[in-house]
Image (spheres, grey):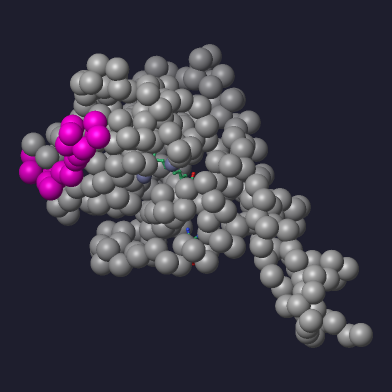
Amino acid sequence: KSKSSLNQTINNNHQNGIILNKTSNHNGQADNSSKTLEIPGKLKVKNFVWRNIIAFIYLHTAALYGLYLAITSAKIITFLFAYVLAVFGGLGITAGAHRLWAHKSYKAKWPLRLFLMLCQTLAFQNSIYEWVRDHRVHHKFTDTNADPHNAKRGFFFSHIGWLMLRKHPDVKNKGSTIDMTDLESDAFVMFQKKYYLIMMPIITFIIPTMTGCYVLGDSLKNSWYVVAIFRYTISLNFTWLVNSYAHIWGTKPYDKSISPTNTKLVGILAIGEGWHNYHHVFPWDYKTAEVQTYTTNWTLYFINLWAKWGLAYDLKTVSEEIIQKRVLRTGDGSHPCTTENDVQ
Ligand code: ST9
Ligand code: ZN
Ligand code: ZN
């Protein structure tokens, strides 16, 4: 009996991010003898993206060499410059791509949006448009196959592995339901999207390296490995910790039923983005954390500064009363108000 033209493929049984394919013949009976279709997103060699795998191996090896040079031969000013760039690139992600564009937790006038767009380009984490689309999908479909960095697939996948593999089809299918019209009407976002492949290498690698050489007077080697490569690779890893570490280890004061956690370590390294349990419960809060974490929430200081100058406005936040109600209803008991009946 010829089956090939009548076979209908049903993709289901998504287990731990790996799809099992079932085929059925025209009688609707399962036909396990048929060859399974190849589905992108599967943990199969043919879905590996070798360009990215090679790039990440180079980046991490070269970053270790950059660290060695930073300790042994680079000027202190070169290292400080790398640090400052890491912070500005980080703010482009946290205050820009994340809190402003992905979550609309505050509004920004055009000079601030231009500045944040340039800082976000310095971080080379894809264009704002692509970053926001992935992030909105992550929030809407957390811990499912439609989540680009689904933490259920383990630390490695949610940290870096997801960037080395074709995306799971659910990311693209369910991701197509995400509304991106607000970004499409932002001229800076669309300009950056259009010219990303020109702007990104210039801002992320060329200008920082040239500044190290010609302004700070360090060698080309030190400038490249310390300012460009080491700084970029460390920033990437600190960012990825939010997707990996802060979805696996830590407390869940606001909702114990979800994977995102509160972790101070990641909070510090990711300049205020480690209170991830809070953030997934109240994603519209521009602080992404409660007030008591203010001291390590640099991004909050940064946005408040721009608000003082009138360039950031309509800052959205959550009342203590709503937080406390949520803590008592769904928290894991680690929040101080659970025992003290008082939100600090
Ligand atoms: C990077 C991003 O590192 C890091 C994000 C971290 C987020 C953390 C969030 C936490 C809060 C913030 C903390 C900040 C802390 C900062 C501290 C700093 C000190 N929805 O992607 P493609 C469709 S990037 C809807 O090519 P493949 C769409 O039609 C690092 N649709 O899929 C698309 O076409 P188009 C550097 C979607 O082929 C088409 O599919 N960059 C969605 O499977 C193809 O999309 C890299 O390493 C969606 N979500 O490839 C490059 N997604 O775009 C990484 C896709 O034309 N990327 N579609 O509309 C790649 O090479 C590829 O994306 C791939 C998948 C190989 C991963
Ligand atoms: Zn998350
Ligand atoms: Zn978010």
Please check the rendered image and state whether residue 208 is part of the magenta-colored stretch, yes or no. Answer: no
Task: Based on the picture, tell me whether residue 318 belongs to the magenta stretch.
Answer: yes
Q: Residue 187 appears at what percent x and percent y? A: 26, 63
Q: Quadrant of residue 262?
A: top left
Judge from the rendering whether residue 63 lies leftward or rightward of residue 187; answer left or right.
right
**Is 3 located above or below residue 307 in the figure?**
below
Quadrant where the C terminus sits is top left
Asked whether 71 or 178 is in front, the reply is 178
| Residue in front for this viewpoint, 97 or 323 | 323
Residue numbers of the magenta segment: 309-325
Residue 74 position within the rendered picture, expressed as x and y whole percent measured from the top left: 47, 20
Residue 25 vertical position relative to residue 98 in the rendered view, above or below: below
Task: Decide which of 158, 146 is in the foreground and name it.
Answer: 146
Q: Quadrant of residue 75?
A: top left
Q: Quadrant of the N terminus?
A: bottom right
Residue depicted at x 24% and y 31%:
324
Left/right of residue 87 with respect to residue 52 in the rendered view:
left
Residue 41 is at least partly visible in this image: yes
Q: Residue furthest right?
A: 1
Residue at left offset 68%, top offset 58%: 13
Residue displayed at 27% across by 63% down: 182
Percent x, y of residue 79: 41, 22
Where residue 37 sits: x, y (%)?
Answer: 76, 68
